[in-house]
């Protein structure tokens, strides 16, 4: 039987639909995903650490467009007032994001107000795609303390740069383990390193190496508080950071020493990079 020209056209369209991306097909879904705007997770997490510590409303460079997308999604869920949709990931946005995380059933570190890979992807479903993701990785034992795999990899690279072993006095995920730590070790990404046998020059060299690979790091001494000499290091942009460690990272970016008095940074000057930025250098 000979098809009319109209029927032939319809038949051809039906045959071509799976290839050309009919609505709902895998090809169409992929095209839709490509068309979505992007949230750069690295930039967003950086802003969530720095912006709450600023004395003004200066935006974190490179983060505005991503933060705006996150804030609009929080606004549409009625977790953030419209006046705070400004590209500034300050304390109000952190609190709103924590409420969102709790609405997903998350608790503890998973609801710390820092955008995590999974929660960010859920917030962006149908709205935005997430690029440059960060994950802290699984918890592992290292030298008798617990850290996560991202921190372990960072420490391994610092050791390689130094050509010497680093001994951990305190690890991460240690809530209440050391009252002098003021909660910084309650989450992930934070360690204390022994300085036993190190002179001043070596201590400074260790801090420099830690900073190069993505830690906010400082030499701590007994004149500052009731603690022995040690090196305190916080993995920048670890999404498991405690609130206190988040604040220390923000202060580090702002040229401060990470202590309660918020004095000037007393460590060696290096270009501030996250672990991910260091790997791409």
Image (spheres, rainbow, N blue to C red):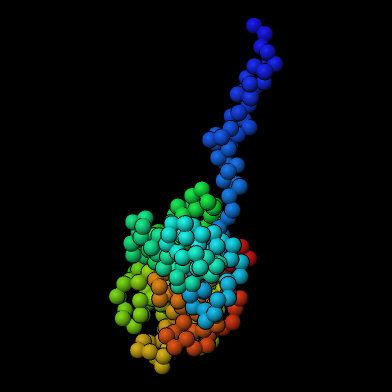
75 versus 189 height, above or below: above
Query: Is residue 183 in view from this perspective?
Result: yes
Q: Which quarter of the rendered picture does the C terminus lie within?
A: bottom right
Look at 52% across and 88% down and name the residue there: 264
* Residue 193 screen position, x and y as percent: 42, 78
* Residue 165 screen position, x and y as percent: 46, 73
Q: Which quarter of the rendered picture does the N terminus lie within?
A: top right
Q: Toward the viewer: 116 or 269?
A: 116
* Residue 92 screen position, x and y as percent: 45, 70
Which residue is outermost to the left?
A: 176
Residue 82 is left or right of residue 183, and the answer is right
Which residue is outermost to the bottom?
A: 223
97 versus 257 height, above or below: above
Q: Toward the viewer: 228 or 121?
A: 121
Q: Toward the viewer: 249 or 144?
A: 249
Query: Is residue 139 in view from this perspective?
Result: no
21 versus 229 height, above or below: above
Q: Toward the viewer: 77 or 62?
A: 77
* Residue 175 screen position, x and y as percent: 31, 72
Q: Quadrant of residue 223?
A: bottom left
Look at 52% across and 65% down and name the residue there: 85
Which residue is outermost to the right?
A: 5
């Amino acid at each position: 039987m000979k098809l009319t020209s109209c029927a032939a056209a319809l038949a051809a369209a039906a045959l071509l639909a799976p290839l050309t991306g009919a609505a709902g097909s895998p090809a169409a879904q992929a095209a839709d995903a490509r068309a979505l705007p992007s949230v750069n997770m690295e930039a967003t997490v950086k802003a969530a650490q720095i912006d709450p510590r600023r004395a003004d409303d200066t935006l974190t460079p490179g983060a505005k467009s991503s933060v705006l997308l996150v804030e609009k999604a929080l606004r549409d869920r009625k977790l953030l007032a419209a006046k705070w949709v400004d590209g500034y990931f300050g304390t109000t946005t952190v609190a709103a994001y924590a409420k969102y995380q709790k609405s997903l059933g998350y608790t503890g570190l998973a609801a710390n107000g820092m955008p995590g890979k999974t929660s960010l992807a859920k917030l962006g479903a149908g709205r935005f795609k997430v690029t440059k993701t960060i994950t802290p990785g699984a918890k592992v034992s290292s030298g008798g303390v617990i850290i996560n795999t991202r921190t372990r990899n960072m420490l391994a690279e610092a050791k390689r740069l130094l050509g010497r072993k680093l001994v951990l006095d305190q690890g991460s995920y240690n809530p209440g383990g050391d009252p002098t730590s003021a909660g910084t070790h309650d989450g992930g990404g934070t360690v204390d390193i022994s300085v036993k046998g190190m002179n001043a020059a070596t201590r400074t060299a260790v801090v420099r190496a830690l900073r190069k690979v993505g830690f906010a790091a400082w030499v701590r001494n007994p004149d500052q508080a009731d603690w022995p000499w040690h090196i305190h290091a916080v993995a920048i942009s670890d999404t498991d950071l405690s609130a206190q460690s988040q604040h220390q990272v923000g202060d580090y970016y702002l040229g401060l020493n990470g202590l309660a008095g918020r004095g000037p940074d007393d460590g060696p000057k290096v270009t501030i990079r996250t672990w991910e930025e260091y790997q791409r250098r």
